């Protein structure tokens, strides 16, 4: 803001004064708030922001994997993306902030596009034979885009969360392994409570385990066979 002039004198003693010139010192661009990475659900809108002092122009850029390039028309201090798609997952965005003195490049901000749960397949109910050595069986809940799992059991007192102990493992995964024998396995109900990548919670169907109680084989009459004779013997069995 200072003013300057010069006085010029010749050998004859005549002097002349120049016009006044002002010195204007323009400040540099300084980014005070960087754009931040976003994790948002498929189909939603996303907005990135950059805050800078002494800025006169903005230019947003995108990197889809082959380097940053300018985004035509995106010349404000914010960038809005409408109805994001799965193809945009992993894109990076940054802003060039300028004035007539300098240009500053913001940090790059990532876009993660999350999706809701997609159930591929569910477990079946389990029927257990009452005798024989111990064994295990699995409830496999095949689902995509889920990051939180909690298996629960109801043995007659309402559903309770399971932990990896004693007869159970995988209680916080999509596959629950149950070891038999287990005291309350007959008639026990199982279900999975889960949360998808978008933060939506849901509960699966109920899967039952029961012990099969076969009826004894009914008696059969004695049969006399002759050599090379063919006889049909029927056995009545239910179980």
Image: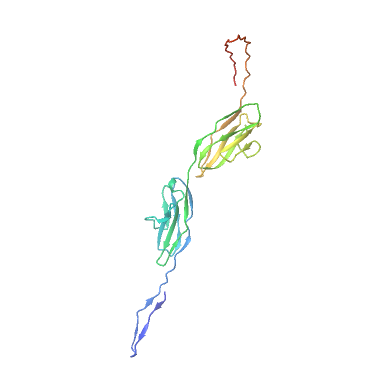
Q: Position of residue 174 (x, y in %)?
A: 56, 39
Task: Please name whichever residue, 33 or 104, is drawn nearer the observer in this view of the structure.
Answer: 104
- Quadrant of residue 25 in the image? bottom left
Task: Please name whichever residue, 145 or 161, is drawn nearer the observer in this view of the structure.
Answer: 145
Q: Is residue 162 left or right of residue 91?
A: right
Q: Position of residue 228 (x, y in %)?
A: 58, 10
**Residue 78 to residue 85: above or below:** below
Q: In which quadrant will I find the N terminus? A: bottom left
Task: Please name whichever residue, 123 or 49, is drawn nearer the observer in this view of the structure.
Answer: 123
Q: Position of residue 225 (x, y in %)?
A: 61, 10
Q: Residue at x 56, y 32 (%)?
A: 207
How many numbered markers are drawn? 0
Query: Quick one: which residue is furthest to the bottom in this view?
Result: 12
Q: In which quadrant will I find the C terminus? A: top right
**Residue 215 to residue 159: above or below:** above
Q: Is residue 86 left or right of residue 158?
A: left
Q: Is residue 58 left or right of residue 133?
A: left
């Amino acid at each position: 803001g200072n003013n300057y002039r010069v006085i010029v004198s010749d050998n004859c003693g005549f002097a002349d004064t120049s016009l006044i010139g002002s010195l204007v010192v323009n400040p540099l661009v300084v980014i005070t708030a960087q754009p931040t990475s976003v994790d948002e659900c498929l189909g939603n809108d996303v907005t990135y922001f950059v805050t800078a002092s002494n800025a006169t122009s903005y230019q947003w850029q995108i990197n889809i994997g082959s380097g940053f390039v300018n985004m035509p028309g995106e010349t404000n201090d914010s960038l809005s993306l409408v109805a994001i798609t799965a193809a945009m997952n992993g894109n990076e965005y940054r802003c060039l902030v300028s004035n007539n003195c300098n240009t500053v490049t913001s940090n790059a901000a990532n876009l993660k596009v999350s999706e809701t749960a997609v159930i591929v397949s569910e477990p079946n109910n389990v029927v257990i034979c009452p005798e024989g050595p111990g064994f295990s069986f699995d409830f496999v809940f095949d689902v995509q885009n889920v990051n939180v799992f909690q298996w629960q059991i109801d043995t007659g007192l309402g559903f309770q969360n399971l932990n990896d102990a004693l007869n159970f493992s995988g209680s916080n995964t999509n596959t629950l392994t149950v070891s038999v024998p287990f005291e309350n396995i007959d008639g026990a109900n199982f279900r999975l409570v889960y949360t998808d990548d978008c933060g939506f919670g849901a509960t699966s169907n109920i899967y039952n385990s029961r012990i099969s109680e076969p009826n004894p084989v009914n008696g059969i009459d004695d049969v006399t066979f002759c050599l090379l004779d063919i006889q049909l013997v029927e056995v009545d069995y239910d179980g």
